[in-house]
Image (spheres, rainbow, N blue to C red):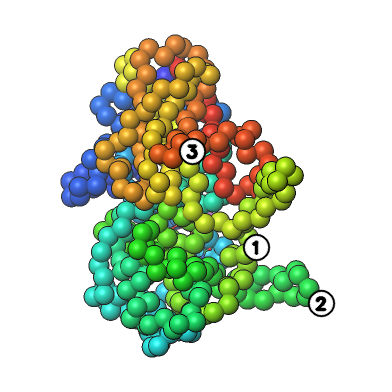
Amino acid sequence: MANEMSRRDVVKTGLAAAALGAAGSFEWVLPALAQGEVMVPFTDSHVSPPFNPNPAPDRRLLDTRQIAGAYTPKDQFFTTQHYGHPEIDPAAYRLKVSGLVSTNLALSIDELRKMGNTELIAGFECSGNRRPVQGLVGNGRWTGVPLKTVLDKAGLKADAQEIVFFGADRGKESVVFRATPPMEVEQQYGRSLPRARALAADPAPFLAYALNGEPLTKHQGAPLRLIVPGWYGAPNVKWLSEIVVQNEPYMGKFQTHWYRTLKGEMINGELKWVETGITHLNLKSFVARVTRNGSDHKITVIALSDGTPLKSVEVQIDGGAWAPATVDPSTTAKYGWKLYHLTVKNLAAGEHTLVSRATDVNGKVQPTEKELENKKTFLEDNSQHPRKVMIG
Ligand SMILES: Nc1nc2c(c(=O)[nH]1)N[C@H]1C(S)=C(S)[C@@H](COP(=O)(O)O)O[C@H]1N2
Ligand SMILES: [Mo]
């Protein structure tokens, strides 16, 4: 089969990191492909490798067919941002904390390390992650300091309501509202959290300086980034350089304009247009890869939630009955992604349509594309995603 990639090809085409890890780290328990297992390509919905040309471009997608373990290696972790990757001298770096605090802070990475050095497993996707590729997704084992530890050290004043996080990256943005004439202003990437959310015990926002046990790469926000467990990527401010505490809501572009969803909803019997900000992850799953071993086909699904436990992830083939998939025991962390597997015996030759759906413990079911038709913006596409494969 010309289109199938063997285990050896996959190892050669970019899983050096996985091979390395097998020797030295507990993370890499699953090989990309078992002996005798071959990749079954998607026929409709996947762009061809290479996903990660070297040197890494401004944006990188995860090729979900290559997943070899619970955690996404640093050189495969997706990367997307608005203003490129700023270079920061780690020795000169200080995280500044100012505004409505008792004590202004300027903390080096060493000082932060001494304040915390705890771990958080968190997976997330970009709110723009969607068909056909679904590559803006990853799962990490992050090391760092709970945000609350830093805010407690600074001491939030009584009237502190909004915690604003600025990255070191800057870019020009045109101001289109009520500006005469229209003008360009230079901005930093910024996002905010309300006080209660910033101080919450679970999920607790986290300041990470390492991914999978190694210092962050510049693509992942070195030397420090925010992680809001169970939320989309946009709030996870990279190259975090300043925390500003204020009383007023933060109205920056990436907080109030860019990362929002417009959806028609029936309210009191009337269709109303509702605009919401991008916050917690919506219940989602999608088929990440299909492999064949003899007459067995193994379907691997990635599932995401905001931390709400899942009741099931099911797979449907060609409109038939939904079959329950089994969670991979290496992916049970509350805020991590979950990998699910389903092995199908004797799938007939020909083209097949595979789709997955997740259901959480509250009975919420991942919506179909049809059920999301009133969502007019493309962010937060958590719809069921049918994918096609050709067998034989
Ligand atoms: N400073 C900064 N942080 C940022 C962004 C950015 O443009 N600048 N983009 C955000 C968005 S939209 C996403 S999806 C995630 C991507 O994180 P990753 O590149 O580590 O995968 O970073 C977030 N943090
Ligand atoms: Mo994003």
> Mark 2 is on which residue type?
Thr
Q: What element carries label 1?
A: loop
* Number of residues whose C-alpha sits closer than 10 Å to that of mark 2, classed few (under 14), some (14–19) or many (20 or more): few
Taking depth in this image into account, of 81 and 225 the one nearest to the observer is 225
Q: Is residue 262 left or right of residue 142?
A: right
Tell me the distance, in whole angstroms, between the alpha carbons under discs 3 and 1: 28 Å
Vertical position of residue 324 compared to residue 153: above or below: above
Q: In this view, does 39 lie to the left or right of 389?
A: left
- Disc nearest the viewer among 2 and 1: 1
What number is the disc on residue 72?
Answer: none
Q: Mark 3 highlights which residue?
A: 364
Q: Residue 152 at what x, y percent from top left? A: 34, 78
Q: Is mark 2 on a helix, strand or loop?
A: loop
* Number of residues whose C-alpha sits closer than 10 Å to that of mark 1, classed few (under 14), some (14–19) or many (20 or more): few
Vertical position of residue 218 compared to residue 31: above or below: below
> Mark 1 is on which residue type?
His
Q: Is residue 349 left or right of residue 27?
A: right
Question: Which quadrant does the C terminus fall into?
Answer: top left
Looking at the image, tell me whether mark 2 or mark 1 is earlier in sequence order: 2
Query: How many marks on residues?
Result: 3
Looking at the image, tell me whether mark 3 or mark 1 is earlier in sequence order: 1
* Number of residues whose C-alpha sits closer than 10 Å to that of mark 3, classed few (under 14), some (14–19) or many (20 or more): few
Q: Mark 2 highlights which residue?
A: 180
